[in-house]
Amino acid sequence: MTRTDPPGLDLARLRAHLDRERPGLVTGELTAEVIQGGRSNLTYVVSDGTGQWVVRRPPLGHVLPTAHDMGREFRVLSGLAGTPVPVPRTVLLCSEPDVLGAQFYVMEFVEGTPYRSAEELTEVGPARTRAIADALVDTLVDLHAVEPEAVGLGDFGRPEGFLERQLRRWKKQLDGSRSRDLPGADELHDRLAAKLPASGRPSIVHGDYRLDNVLVDDRDRISAVLDWEMSTLGDPLTDVALLVAYAERDKVSLQMVSNASSAPGYPSADEVVARYAERSGRDVSALNWYVSFAFFKLAVILEGIYYRHSKGQTVGAGFEGIGDGVARLISHGNETLKEER
């Protein structure tokens, strides 16, 4: 722990706010450190020497409020408390920017390991790796089984027309960052639009569900699902498809995401889908459309990074070859749409 305030977190102001809103919660001097690994919102572990909490706030500088809505994260975490979905208990939400300069919330600190690479899983062995991956799928089934109305989240999103809006949104993002010819991109979008499936029963959707967005306890169970900033009500198969796309990362040399699925013992994409289908009872016959759409989304994200890098708007190393993966994602998306699962 560092004794100096990390960027974006004024410990004196935070302590005063906690003392006012939750008297007696903090009993000693606060220290804090930034949790590394987050790509968007800032996350800190705060301690008074006895207890530990986590603080989440938007990135520094000017941001669009809708893109970093702490209230949405706080609301879904609060709603899922007491359900089979393991989430940290929430402490408070502060919507007043005068405390830390932006909206933020505080939640409990949960012990657990975020497995981010095949190397980390290889150390625990194939049997434990399989157990962890199975727990990841089972927790997703539990999330999709939660009735939104029963936990106060009935108006958390608009399930009607969800896939159509998603496809339109990502096409708009692609057009906004398109600076070169992308063979097959428009064809993939048009084919996705033409084959739009009918969504099944809507559910709470995490939006970025993957192994490195959960914590795993020492018994290989999921102790907490984190990073709910993209959550909404919608089509649950979009979550499943993203798991499949990440599991197939090696087919498209997708270097920007975790390679955990390459570890010995990690189930294949087909095994992931079969376990989800058996345990959820949901129809996954149209899943290839969703997987193809997942590759389209990943291609748009990478193209956006490539565009910003080409304009000199990215900082750091490792971006030079980012644009090379876009074509492979588009091609694989088109091929996936032709396959039968």
Image (tube, rainbow, N blue to C red):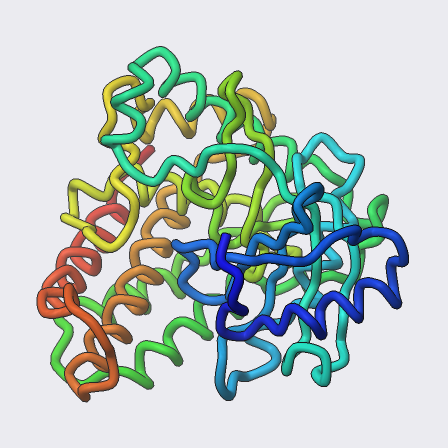
Quadrant hosting residue 271: top left
Image side of residue 266 versus residue 74, left or right: left
Q: Residue at x 50, y 52 (%)?
A: 1
Marks counted in the figure total 0
For the C terminus, which image quadrant? top left
Image side of residue 78 versus residue 270, left or right: right
| Residue 327 placement (x, y as % from top left) | 14, 63
| Residue 23 placement (x, y as % from top left) | 90, 58
When the figure is inspected, residue 90 is found, relative to residue 41, above or below; the finding is above
Front residue of 224/84: it is: 224
Quadrant hosting residue 281: top right
Q: Residue at x 17, y 41 (%)?
A: 250
Q: Residue at x 75, y 58 (%)?
A: 75
Q: Residue at x 76, y 35 (%)?
A: 83
Front residue of 214/235: it is: 214
When the figure is inspected, residue 18 is found, relative to residue 135, above or below; the finding is below
| Residue 94 placement (x, y as % from top left) | 76, 71
When the figure is inspected, residue 35 is found, relative to residue 146, above or below; the finding is below
Q: Is residue 277 visible?
A: no
Image side of residue 104 versus residue 285, left or right: right
Q: Is residue 178 visible?
A: yes
Image side of residue 23 versus residue 272, left or right: right
| Residue 146 placement (x, y as % from top left) | 73, 39
Front residue of 10/149: it is: 10
